[in-house]
Image: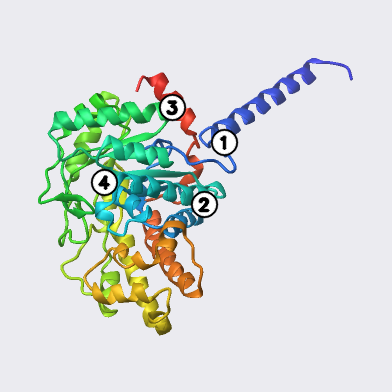
Amino acid sequence: YTPNAAGAKNLITFLNLSLFIFKLAKNKTKNIPERRMNMPLVPMKAILDTVYSHRYAAAAFNVNTASQAEALIGVHEVFRAPAIVQGAELANGFMGGCVDFAHSTPGQKRTGAANIAKAVKARADDGAVPVALHLDHGKSLESVKAAVEGGYTSVMIDGSSLPLEDNIALTREVVKYAHPRGVTVEGELGVLAGVEDHVFGAQSTYTHPLDAIRFFKATGVDCLAVSYGTMHGACKGKNVKLRREIVIAIRECMLHEGIDGVLVSHGSSTVPQYIVDEINWLGGRLTDVGGIPIEELKTSIACGIGKINVDTDIRLAVTRNLRELFEKHPWLKTDASTHGVYALLKQLPEAVDPRCFLAPVMELVMYGTASTNALRLLDDSIRRGVAEMAGTLIVSFGMVGKSAVVKPLSLEEMADHYRKQGI
């Protein structure tokens, strides 16, 4: 080989072209995080950091049994969507073995938090999508500590019923506890009407945008639940119209002030009419129920809502499935392991919360243990109810395929981030 001008020029052209292709490929893949096999649960912030840049909202679903948590992660895997599994304070009490979950003890809540975390971790460790476990409506620092010690990677502290200064003080206290552990914190400002577990509001108090900005700055929270017209519970009224201008104003102020945070929509179940009708055909007695139309929620996503909480929809679908199960398999009505559930369904036609019916099968509730064929059928009906509603909303909220854009940070890595940011 003898070097010459033409050969050198061709070589330089080839190297430049190779460098261009390399840079192009690097740019194409730089936003796709490295995947980790058998990764532990992620902080919720790892998921929320992607919602605005990729134009979707992360649905967060409440669960009250081990099999609900497992089924929820499973349906997210089908759609390759990041999963936020939520357990409320009273859910922790129920999962801790307290049938009268409204009056559960701190010890039962700690046990329940650990039971939920165990079920979620077992399913997430073998899964293909990032999963966060979030405490919904924690009422005190003690309840937050119980959740974190049990294995939660994210917590909400609900001081919305307090005066603004007290709400800020309580939330800041939780942030100081959680962030050094890498745990995400959600606050709430404004009051939603309606009833959910121990959360009650006679009427809505809308969130003031300037108060929201002050709240973010004073507390250091990662996300904030705002009141803009949604409601807790199954009775949200008909023809709900959301005040999306509140969301727009808060989001615009956040961008102007350089605030890194996500806005959350609570009380956002859609309460599908077909499920309500089916429950009533099967012996239920539900009246004056209604939810937030999916189109209203989708428009809110475009206005700045990045996380949407859903609880009642899953309750309704599971309740419908339980009623349908006993109609399809009459022998379950007298089976030793399931007749207690059937008796409560008959006794409580107006109830929509499956916890009202599941007290006789607490081994299934707490650990997912289905020791008889009857219990396996019962468990399957619960799982299918979860999958039906979660799958519908995963698609509606634009979550399909978004697990690929989530950087799977550990709690330790997130704690280091907070430390560097001084929050």
Q: Is residue 414 left or right of residue 108?
A: right
Q: Is residue 31 above or below residue 63?
A: above
Q: Position of residue 323 (x, y in %)?
A: 34, 75
Front one among 419 and 395: 419
Residue that mark 3 sits on: 415
Which badge, 2 or 3, comes first in the chain's sequence?
2
Q: Could you tell me how many numbered marks the image carries? A: 4
Residue that mark 1 sits on: 34
How far apart are the two marked residues, 1 and 3, measured between alpha carbons?
19 Å
| Quarter of the figure with residue 422 | top left
Which badge, 1 or 4, comes first in the chain's sequence?
1
Going by the numbered disc 4, the residue's amino acid type is Ser
Q: Is residue 216 above or below residue 362?
A: above
Q: Position of residue 235 (x, y in %)?
A: 18, 61
Residue that mark 4 sits on: 265
Q: Position of residue 358 (x, y in %)?
A: 35, 66
How far apart are the two marked residues, 4 and 3, measured between alpha carbons?
26 Å
SS for tag 2?
helix
How far apart are the two marked residues, 2 and 1, measured between alpha carbons?
21 Å
Residue that mark 2 sits on: 123
Which badge, 2 or 1, comes first in the chain's sequence?
1
Going by the numbered disc 2, the residue's amino acid type is Arg
Q: Is residue 251 above or below residue 421?
A: below
